Amino acid sequence: MQTPEEFEVSRRGVLVGGAASVATATLVPAGPAMAAPTPVPPPTAKVAFSVNGQAHELELDTRVSLLDALREHLHLTGTKKGCDHGQCGACTVIADGRRINSCLTLAVMHEGEKITTIEGLGTPDRMHAMQDAFVVHDGYQCGYCTPGQICSAVAVLGEIAAGVPSHVTADLTAKPKVTPAELRERMSGNICRCGAYSNIIDAIVDVAGAKT
């Protein structure tokens, strides 16, 4: 039988043995690599609508917002992406006569609708009355929010003309009037960080007066 002295191993021997075992482990061939999962394409759907009087049919990822469909697929970049949370109003467009935040709605939800963006209201050589009023009354500074402001203002006058009351309408049985209080309430969803609010109100009142 061997004595304990015969089992004595030096520190160097332990290190050499450990290094050898690691080297042996690294030489062991690896098993077959697992195949990467096949990516699943996103669900798509066809949507047909009219934008600024022109018919369009698109096949879109069902998660695409109306804002991104207008900007990225139809290249109508007048509609601005601001907060992308429905808080600033820069993305306001008119859908079947009502104003909406296009960043908060999916494009596929607007099948068959008529969408109007700032490009559909007027052109530089033939401006809409509201666009002209914004210029006359200096209703903008940096201009980033202006497309949404103008689309919203056009829809606001349509709401008032149709007799739709707001939270500040005193008499719900009477037709709302174009007053600064009504306009401030109705336009409150459109934020102008430059602070051109008073000029915007003047522009809307001007257009309303021209129609009466």
Image (cartoon, grey):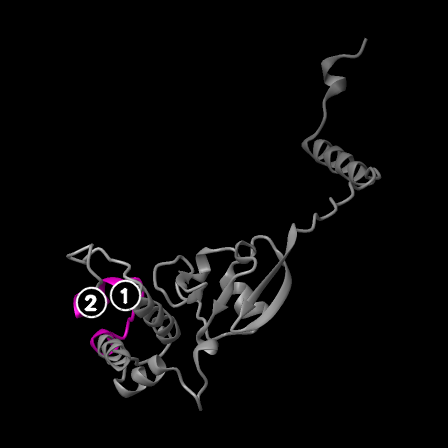
Name the side, left or right, on which 85 lies relative to 42.
left
In the figure, 166 relative to 8: above or below?
Answer: below
* Residue placed furthest toward the left: 170
* Residue placed furthest toward the bottom: 125
- Residue depicted at x 52% and y 55%: 106
Q: Which stretch appears magenta? A: 179-200
Q: Position of residue 122 (x, y in %)?
A: 44, 82
Type of amino acid under label 1: Ile
Residue 107 located within the stretch drawn in magenta? no
Tell me the SS state at disc 1.
helix
Q: Position of residue 56 (x, y in %)?
A: 61, 68
Q: Which residue is mark 2?
A: 177
Q: Considering the image in quadrants, where does the N terminus appear?
A: top right
Mark 2 Cα shell of 10 Å, populated few (<14), some (14-19), many (≥20): some
Cα distance, mark 1 to mark 2? 7 Å
In depth, the one of 34 and 160 nearer the eye is 160
The answer to whether the residues at label 1 and label 2 have Cβ atoms under 8 Å apart is yes
- Residue depicted at x 35% and y 74%: 150
Q: Position of residue 138 (x, y in %)?
A: 27, 84
- The label on residue 160 is 1
In depth, the one of 3 and 156 nearer the eye is 156
* Displayed quadrant of residue 184: bottom left
- Residue depicted at x 75% and y 33%: 17
